[in-house]
Image (tube, rainbow, N blue to C red):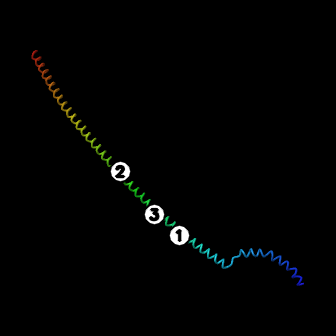
């Protein structure tokens, strides 16, 4: 039976070997040897190290660029602050000058009005003095006329009395 069995199995094994050989070959083609795997690993490690180095260089470059940009912006902000301070100082100086000039104008205007008031007061005083003098003069004249009239009337009365006596 053994002989017969081997006759029967040979074609099966040949058929099986014929079918599995391409599959096995395909598997073997896809299988990598340990040395190839180590080469690939080393190559990947080198590539990753190079990539890491490039990324670090890019980060350093980006950081340097950002730092320079930050410094530039800081400088611009400082310049703008200085310009703002100068503008505020100029504006404050202008306002102070305007206020001082306005104060001077008000003082001058007040002085001019004070002088006019004094002049008007003096003019009124002169007018009142002139009116008093005129009234005294008129009063004196009235007194003179009254005395003259009283004297004339007294003389007429005395003459009338003398005449009828």
Residue on which disc 3 sits: 71
What residue is shown at x 16% (from left), y 28% (from top)?
140
Badge 1 local density, few (<14 within 10 Å), some, or many (20+)?
Answer: few
Earlier along the polypeptide chain: callout 2 or callout 1? 1
Q: Give the vertical position of 85 relative to 30 (above or below).
A: above
Q: Secondary structure beneath disc 3? A: helix
Badge 3 local density, few (<14 within 10 Å), some, or many (20+)?
Answer: few
Q: Please state the horizontal and vertical placement of residue 45, each as a whole percent of the image.
A: 60, 75
Displayed quadrant of residue 150: top left
Q: Are marks 2 and 1 in contact (CB under 8 Å)?
A: no
Earlier along the polypeptide chain: callout 3 or callout 1? 1
Q: Please state the horizontal and vertical placement of residue 57, each as a whole percent of the image.
A: 53, 69
Displayed quadrant of residue 38: bottom right
Q: Secondary structure beneath disc 2? A: helix
Residue on which disc 1 sits: 57
What residue is shown at x 66% (from left), y 79% (from top)?
35
Cα separation between marks 3 and 1: 21 Å
Earlier along the polypeptide chain: callout 2 or callout 3? 3
Q: Are marks 3 and 1 in contact (CB under 8 Å)?
A: no
């Amino acid at each position: 039976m053994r002989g017969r069995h081997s006759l029967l199995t040979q074609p099966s094994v040949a058929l099986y070997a014929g079918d599995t050989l391409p599959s096995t070959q395909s598997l073997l083609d896809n299988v990598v040897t340990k040395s190839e795997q180590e080469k690939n690993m080393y190559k990947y490690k080198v590539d990753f190290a190079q990539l890491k180095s490039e990324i670090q260089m890019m980060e350093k470059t980006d950081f340097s660029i950002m730092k320079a940009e930050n410094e530039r912006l800081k400088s611009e902000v400082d310049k703008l602050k200085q310009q703002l301070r100068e503008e505020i100082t100029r504006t404050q100086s202008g306002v102070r000058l305007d206020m001082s000039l306005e104060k001077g104008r008000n003082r001058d205007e007040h002085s001019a009005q004070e002088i006019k008031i004094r002049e008007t007061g003096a003019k009124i005083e002169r007018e009142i003095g002139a009116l008093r003098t005129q009234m005294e003069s008129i009063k004196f004249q009235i007194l003179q006329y009254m005395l003259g009239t009283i004297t004339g009337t007294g003389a007429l009365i005395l003459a009338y009395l003398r005449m009828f006596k």
